[in-house]
Amino acid sequence: DVKVTQSSRYLVKRTGEKVFLECVQDMDHENMFWYRQDPGLGLRLIYFSYDVKMKEKGDIPEGYSVSREKKERFSLILESASTNQTSMYLCASRVWDNTEAFFGQGTRLTVV
Amino acid sequence: GENVEQHPSTLSVQEGDSAVIKCTYSDSASNYFPWYKQELGKGPQLIIDIRSNVGEKKDQRIAVTLNKTAKHFSLHITETQPEDSAVYFCAASTSGTYKYIFGTGTRLKVLA
């Protein structure tokens, strides 16, 4: 079975902190994603990576950056956390376009 | 821009009844339509998908129908069970692009 693992289930951070969310997949997938999930807004794409060191901005990239130094690992970075970044963050991977995306269990981040 | 509308936002049915969730997409080039189920505390998981060269697909109690002309697709769950209670997301995607466009989700409650 494909496994996508996010490093934390719950995180509480202070405003202004630099926050790292880590995601690892074990199926050699090319594509990896970071989504943000908020009630009534569905899943919104923050960043996408189609290969090592390659990235594309999604719909809501402001305040975020990403890093993909190895194929299996995709990190989301909040440069200076703000309260409006309190949310559920979901990582996903897939082998190629128009195929099943496999999601991690999510990280619920609270910024106080 | 591309958009997927999903209705209803909440749906309550009696155990054993059927449930239908409807989505409308805007991009006529979309050709892959997955449905994801998200249980409490978990990431979304694919339950069924359909490609644009097919009008209907079934998997046991779950079916998806696609009307390309109207740009509608629907999820049908028959003989609902309490374990079907979850949030369901539809999505649309296009070959050669990286994006899934997700609907805003439907919270299904199956009442015992």
Image (spheres, coloured by chain):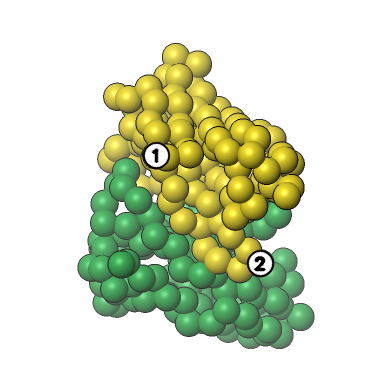
Chain colours: A green, B yellow
Residue B105 position, x and y percent, is 62, 45
Residue A54 position, x and y percent, is 30, 63
Q: Which residue is mark 2?
A: A87
Have a look at marks 1 and 2 and say if they share a chain: no
What residue is drawn where x is 47% and y is 43%?
B35
Q: Chain of mark 2?
A: A
From the viewer's side, name the closer residue of B48 and A98: B48
Distance from disc 1 to disc 2, alpha carbons, whole Å, reads 33 Å
From the viewer's side, name the closer residue of A3 and B15: B15
- Secondary structure of the residue carrying tag 2 is strand
A102 vs A68: above or below:
above
Residue B43 position, x and y percent, is 52, 63
**Amino acid bearing label 2:** Ser
For residue B14, which quarter of the picture?
Answer: top right
- Viewer can see residue A79: no
Residue at the top extreme, as displayed: B69
Viewport quadrant of the N terminus of chain A:
bottom left
Residue at the right extreme, as displayed: A112
Task: Give the number of the mark in front: 1 or 2.
Answer: 1
Q: Which residue is mark 1?
A: B59
Q: How many marks?
A: 2
Q: Chain of mark 1?
A: B
Q: What label sits on residue A41 in the rendered view?
A: none
For residue B52, which quarter of the picture?
Answer: top left
Q: Is residue B55 left or right of residue A71?
A: right
From the viewer's side, name the closer residue of B58 and A10: B58
